[in-house]
Amino acid sequence: MDETSAWSWEHAAAVLPDLLEGLQITVLATVVGMVIASVLGLVVAMVRRSGLRVVTIPVGFLVEFIRSTPLLVQLVFANLLFTQFPSLTIGCVVLGVHYATYMSEVYRAGIDAVPKGQWEAAVALDLPRSRTWGAVVLPQAIRNTLPGLGNYAVSMFKETPFLFAIAVVEMYTAAQQYGADTFRYMEAITMAGLLFLLVSYPTSLLVRRLENRLA
Amino acid sequence: MPENDTTPAIEFQGVVKRFGDNVVLDGLDFTVAQGDRVTLIGPSGSGKTTILRLLMTLEEANEGLILIDGDPYTHEMRGGKRVAIPDKRRSLVRRRVGMVFQQFNLFPNMTVLENIIEAPIHVLGKSKAEATTIAEALLDKVGLAEKRDERPTKLSGGQQQRVAIARALAMEPEILLLDEVTSALDPELVADVLGVLRNIAETTDITMLIVTHEMQFAREVSNRVLMFDKGKIIEEADPETIFTSPTHERTQEFLRAVL
């Protein structure tokens, strides 16, 4: 009893290779998820701004639906529904779609923050819609959204352990597996937590610096 | 294009503009001849800026018609009914109209040069080289040739406004709308901007519609002054007459307050 409850530095070290391997999957899922969230979020924001009720109403409903149900439920549900795809793919897509609903709000705020005068200047120059968006509004709006994007990236990174539920071996799952094999859960989970902290804290600091620079 | 010299550059026919219950323009009729320099004066809320915004399609009239060189702009009469003209057709007329704003509204994500060549390239279909040559000549004209690669945010208000003037001129407008272009500037920067505008007035035949509080400038540059009150023109005359011997009581009051 004594032997298993005492902290073991040997186990803490032994779990590291597994965790680092898991960390790669964690980072991969975050990066792919954020790419999907960034692109899809922008599409959603622009669709919702179009004012075409045929599309804004269903898209609005979908966004509310996704935001009002837990990520964990969505992951398991999608995994049951799309059995033909690898779990990691499903994990990345569900993370991406889930965060796209948040990112769309960040974009919406970013677009709203572009001064009205910018739109008016575009009209006065008779710029086509594609240039108004592509050359004037979005470059300014996206600058406004960078801190939000960074914050959600950190937040998504910390939510990747949910992928455990669909058997993707990211860092937390790797820790669980090590714990199951050796009964050294405490070391495995502690080290996993530390690694999460090691990545997310410096990233948050970077995001905060970015926020200050853009402010 | 003007059909002949007598076709007005701008014609308002019974234009009504309401914001909610507030009637800003109340059945306005007026014409501006080709090459006229018209200054609109009057207390704030009298509808001057709204006229410019209607001409730039930033607002839409509730009733009446606006013609540019005799061409219907935003609405036309078809079978006795007033119908909106689709944006594609509006845009062809809008291209002849340029505007300079109180707040400059330069694009901060582009350099000075990029601000100026954006529309000539993407609206008029000019090549980048041609647009750049024109832009450099215009920057020279407004005295900012050396700022072509700067970001607008690095410039003073007066410099930004001169870039905005160059940007509007790069579209080779027949009509130029100037909406309180010196109101946001520090007093010592006003003279440069007015100098540039005076130069344009002297060297081009662009029709100009000017909303300003700079009465001296209005006097020098314009050949007609319209006094607005409550959405109507209450007095109009050449600047000499209106500034020295206004007839309407409201005009006298207004000029006493601003001069």
Image: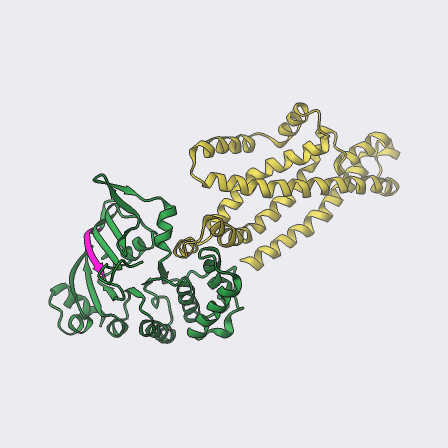
Query: Does residue A112 lie above or below A172 as drawn?
Result: below
Q: Relative to B87, does residue B126 appear above or below in the rendering?
A: below
Quarter of the figure with the N terminus of chain A: top right
Residue A118 shown left or right of residue B38 in the figure = right
Q: Quadrant of residue B187?
A: bottom left
Considering depth in this image, is A145 or A162 the residue closer to the camera?
A145
Task: Give residue A48's position: percent from left, percent from top.
Answer: 47, 38
- Is B14 covered by the magenta stretch? no
A212 above or below B221? above
- Asked whether A202 or B242 is in front, the reply is B242
B28 is higher (above) or lower (below) than A52: below
| Picture coordinates of residue B236, whole percent (x, y) | 16, 64
Residue at screen point 45% across, 50% down:
A128
Q: Residue at x 50, y 72 (%)?
A: B147
Q: Is B29 colored magenta in this rendering? A: yes
Colour yellow, chain: A
Q: Residue at x 67, y 23 (%)?
A: A80
Question: Is residue B45 rendered to the left or right of residue A99?
Answer: left
Q: State the scheme by which the image is colored.
A: by chain
The image quadrant that residue A93 belongs to is top right
Residue A151 is situated, as x and y percent measured from the top left of the image, at: 61, 47
Count of numbered tags: 0
Q: Is B251 on the left-hand or right-hand side of A90?
A: left
Seen from the viewer's position, the closer of residues B203 and A202 is B203
Q: Position of residue B204 (x, y in %)?
A: 33, 70
> Mostly what secondary structure, the magenta segment?
strand
Q: Colour of chain B?
A: green
Q: State the extent of the magenta-drawn residues as a range.
A: B25-32
